[in-house]
Amino acid sequence: MKHSEYFNRFTVIIVTGGSSGIGCSIIKAIQKLNPDACLCNLSRSKPDIFLGNNGKHYPVDLSDSAALSEIAETLRARIESAPAGEVLLVNNSGFGDYGRMPDLNIDKQLSMIDLNVRAVVDLTARLLPSMLERGGVVVNIASTAAFQPTPFLATYGASKAFVRNWSLALNEDLRGTKVRTLAVCPGPTRSNFFKAAGFHSPPMNKGAGGGLDMTADEVADYTLRAIAGRKSLVVTGWKNRCIAFFGSKMPIVAVTRIGAIILRKMRLEQHKK
C-alpha cells in the first residue's frame, strides 16, 4: 500500500497541541492525504490553519485533569458517531523549561509533568476502549532528550524518557489487538518550544554551524512515514540517531556530565546574544 493511501483508513484524527509547531505540521501533512477525516485539535490556542469541513478545534488546557476528562467524553462521543474506520491519536502537547532546578518555578515544573506525562497517559487511557473497538494508532511525541539525563532541562528530559518508555511498553501491552503505538523522538526543532523554554533562539541551529535542528514539517514527514511503516520508535534524522545511540550506550554518569557541559555552554551563548 502506498504511503499516501495508508491514511485513508483513519476516519477520526485527534492531535493535541496542533495549533503550532510539530502538531500543526502533522495536521497539515495529514490533511493533504486524508482531507475528509474528522480532525480534532486539542489546544489552548486556536490554529491559524483551516481544519477542514469535518474538523474542529477544542480549546482546552490538558494539564487540567477535570478539563481533560470532559474533553475525552466529547471525543469518545464523536468517535462513536463517525463513519467506520480507525482512530489516530497524536499526543503532541508539551513544553520545556531551561535552567538549574533550584532556579526554576516549581509550579511550572509540576505543570510540565501534568502536560508532558499525566495528560498523555490519561487521554490515551480514556480513548483506548473506543480505539480497541475500531483499531488505530497512538503516536506519542517524545524527544532525543529521552535517551539520557538532561541537566538544565531535568524535568523535561525525564518526562520525555517516560513518554518513550511508556509508549514502547504500551505497544507490547496492545500486541494482538487492533491498536499499536509509535514513539517519535525529534531533536532540536525550529518551533515555539525553545522560546517557551527560555531560549532566545533554537540551540544548535544551522546558522550557528550546528546543523542539528529540523523544521516541524520535516519531523511531521518522518512521523507520517513511521506510522505508515508500522514502526514503534523513530528518531528523526541520522545525526539525531547518532546522538541518541551514543547517549544510550555510554556510561550514564559520564553522558550526564557531558550533557551538562554542552547545555551550560548553550545557555552562555544565549546570554551573549
Image: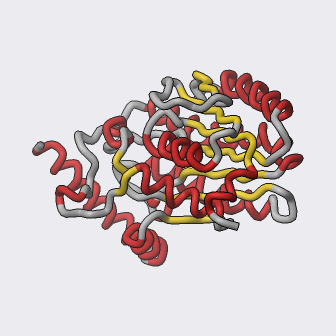
Is residue 236 visible in the rendered image? The answer is yes
Taking the spot 48% from the left edge, 72% from the top edge, the residue there is 248
Taking the spot 73% from the left edge, 27% from the top edge, the residue there is 69
Left-right relation of 151 to 145: left
Q: Position of residue 154 (x, y in %)?
A: 42, 49
Question: Taking 236 as reference, is 39 above or below it?
Answer: above
Q: Position of residue 95 (x, y in %)?
A: 45, 39
User: Tell me, what colour scheme is on the image?
Assistant: secondary structure
Q: How many marks?
A: 0
Camera-nearest residue between 28 and 45: 28
Question: Taking 21 as reference, is 230 above or below it?
Answer: below
Camera-nearest residue between 200 and 50: 50
The quarter holding residue 191 reads top left
Left-right relation of 179 to 14: right
Q: Position of residue 105 (x, y in %)?
A: 39, 31
Is residue 107 visible in the rendered image? The answer is no
Camera-nearest residue between 6 and 199: 6
In the current view of this chain or complex, which residue is farthest to the left?
A: 272
Left-right relation of 13 to 176: left
Q: Position of residue 129 (x, y in %)?
A: 85, 43
- Quadrant location of the N terminus in the rendered image: bottom right
Taking the spot 31% from the left edge, 67% from the top edge, the residue there is 258
- Quadrant location of the C terminus in the rendered image: top left
The quarter holding residue 166 reads bottom right
Taking the spot 80% from the left edge, 32% from the top edge, the residue there is 76
Question: Taking 93 as reference, is 235 above or below it?
Answer: below
